[in-house]
Image (cartoon, rainbow, N blue to C red):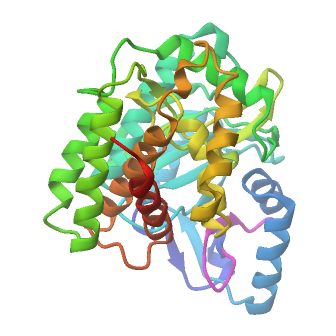
Amino acid sequence: MEDSLYTSVDNQSMSTHFGYPANNIKFVVPNSRQLRYSALKFFLSISHRMYLQCIDIAFHRHTYFKELPLMQTIRSISSTPDAVSCTSLGTPGPYNKYSVLLMTPEGTPILITKVGPSDKTQLLLKNEAHWLQRLASIPPLNGQTPKLLDYRIVIGHALLSQTPCNDKVASIKFTKEHISFLNRFQAACTSNVQFENSGMELSIRKRAQMLVPLVDDKWERRIVNSIWKIKTILGNSNVLMTAAHRDFVHWNIRKGPNGVYVFDWEYAAEEYIPLYDIFSFLIMPRVLRNRLHVTDIPILLKRTRDIALQLDDNGRKCNQLPAQLLAYLLDVCLFYLESNNGAATGDVVVSRYGILMDELCSTLKV
């Protein structure tokens, strides 16, 4: 973040912002208490805000910052010269990006700009810009996705600016509004391509070829066995691929006036299994909380089927459901392993998804 958006200064009198919370900076927030409250309310739930506030009070030795010229470039996109910034620093790693919220001096959100400092994040933001343009051309989804305001490369950084969503967080349960959104999205993006040579199959094959020399023996066997079973089962099925958001989880969804409002389209892709986003919604949050185990797989498959039968296509999207689940788990693991240069140790998602994959591979008959 330093040398791009902000630089640290010695004391508060020289600063416009400070790191929050004090012990483990996740945000760079305005010095103004009112604007800080407005910004954190935009990014976080009330329980999360209270938790961070307790941590910040306990340590209360802040790092102070002032803005650098790149922030002025972002501000020029908003056409609001006195706009105030607050920045979420994101998750560390090769795909790390910063999310800059610009607000009016009264605290009203104007836009969100994602800043990609690395080649990998620039590719993600370029992909998101493509999808936001495409989604804008789908009338049934009007008001349910952000509008692209600007995309540019400045000083080696990708800047993607989009409209913010000020609505409430959507339900953590899969509702009819989620089904309605997926039906509209998939109806506009479904192809006649089956799994063989689909975008998903090609992505899995490419990542696997790159990772097999890097991973340990256990993961090599897991990857090879999974690919064989998926290809054998889905390659001979009538499951048609469709587009997928690929990060369809409740924290990327809000409740808007026209139904659910879905953002963070960086990972969206064509020609993926039709149940991918349902799996993401049901599995990822539970795995991160360690609340999904191999004994839960039958219940998970039943829950997925119950939801998927509400999708258009007369239930055909439910075909080969366990193999679709295995394909989803493998795709996510390959992405995480690639991010970690093949290392699986210490990654909660990789380790827990891997256990689920082993159970599915042991039960899937080909």
Query: What secondary structure do most residues of the magenta stretch adopt?
Result: loop
Residue 241 picture location, percent across and down: 41, 23
Identity of the residue drawn at 56% across and 37% down: 277
Q: Nearer the viewer, residue 168 or 78?
A: 168
Q: Is 159 inside the magenta-drawn segment?
A: no
Identity of the residue drawn at 28% across and 67% down: 219
Residue 200 picture location, percent across and down: 33, 34
Q: Is residue 156 visible to us here?
A: no
Q: Is residue 9 left or right of residue 355?
A: right
Q: Looking at the image, which residue sits at the far front?
A: 365
User: Which quarter of the rendered picture does the C terminus lie within?
Assistant: top left
Identity of the residue drawn at 51% across and 52% down: 71
Question: Looking at the picture, does residue 257 appear above or below residue 47?
Answer: above
Residue 125 picture location, percent across and down: 41, 40
Q: How many marks?
A: 0
Q: Nearer the viewer, residue 213 or 45?
A: 213
Identity of the residue drawn at 81% across and 58% down: 45
Q: Quadrant of residue 92?
A: bottom left
Q: Is residue 264 left or right of residue 341?
A: right
Question: Looking at the picture, does residue 177 appear above or below residue 323?
Answer: above
Residue 83 picture location, percent across and down: 68, 45
Region in magenta = 20-32
User: Which quarter of the rendered picture does the N terminus lie within?
Assistant: bottom left
Q: Is residue 50 visible to us here?
A: yes
Q: Is residue 30 left or right of residue 146?
A: right
